[in-house]
Amino acid sequence: MEAVVASKPMTKVAAICGSLRKASNNRGLIRTALELTKESIDGIEMEYVDISPLPMLNTDLVVDGKLPPAVEAFRQKILLSDSILFASPEYNYSLTGPLKNALDWGSLSPNVWADKAAAIVSAGGGFGGARSHYHLRQVGVFLDLHFINKPEFHLNAFEPPAKFDSDGNLIDEASKEKMKQVLVALQAFTLRLQPKN
């Protein structure tokens, strides 16, 4: 007799970094999340979604109801995802301009962010980017994004021991474990929000 094993549904996560800099510590957090989903977390398929090709929001670029190709490609990736992982650096107590721009393009009707689970991670000085979380959460309320409450992940990148190498890659094992906890919580919350069949 063969045992029937119920498999966990695959959760598609779009990973977005608010920094455009290649060696950004926040981009390093996304790289770590991608590695963890491939190596040690079952049931998550994660894709890095680059926001650098997006033009600044200008509805004059919408011609005959058609969005610019880079915007349409971005929106399709968000639409096809179940949840979002944001790596949000803190600029002047807020989220970055490129990240806000991506949120705005995605919010055009139909809003591709609506009813998706989300999580925020960040790295920086002082509070580790935590203030950007508050602003991003406020924006997310209007966009109908649903953020996990715990665990929070805001890492002071400059406090010993070293957290990142010179290329922005996360090297701190305790921080990697905390990232794993965030991803597991995002997966569980995403599955909880999905309609039951």
Image (cartoon, rainbow, N blue to C red):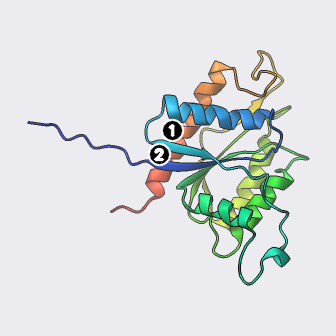
The quadrant in which the N terminus is found is top left
| Residue at position x 80%, y 58% in the image | 100
**Which label belongs to residue 15?**
none
* Residue receiving disc 2: 188
Give the image location of residue 162, x and y in percent. Answer: 77, 17
- Indicate the secondary structure of the residue bearing disc 2: helix
Q: Residue furthest left?
A: 1
What residue is drawn where x is 76% and y is 45%?
88
Question: In the rendered view of the protein, which quadrant contains the C terminus?
Answer: bottom left
Residue bearing the label numbered 1: 184
Horizontal side of residue 66 vs 76, given as left or right: right
Snapshot quadrant of residue 24:
top right
Q: Amino acid at mark 1?
A: Val
* Near-viewer residue (60 or 81): 60
Q: Is residue 52 above or below residue 127?
A: below
Q: Residue furthest front?
A: 69
Distance Cα–Cα, label 1 vs label 2: 6 Å
Q: Residue furthest right?
A: 92
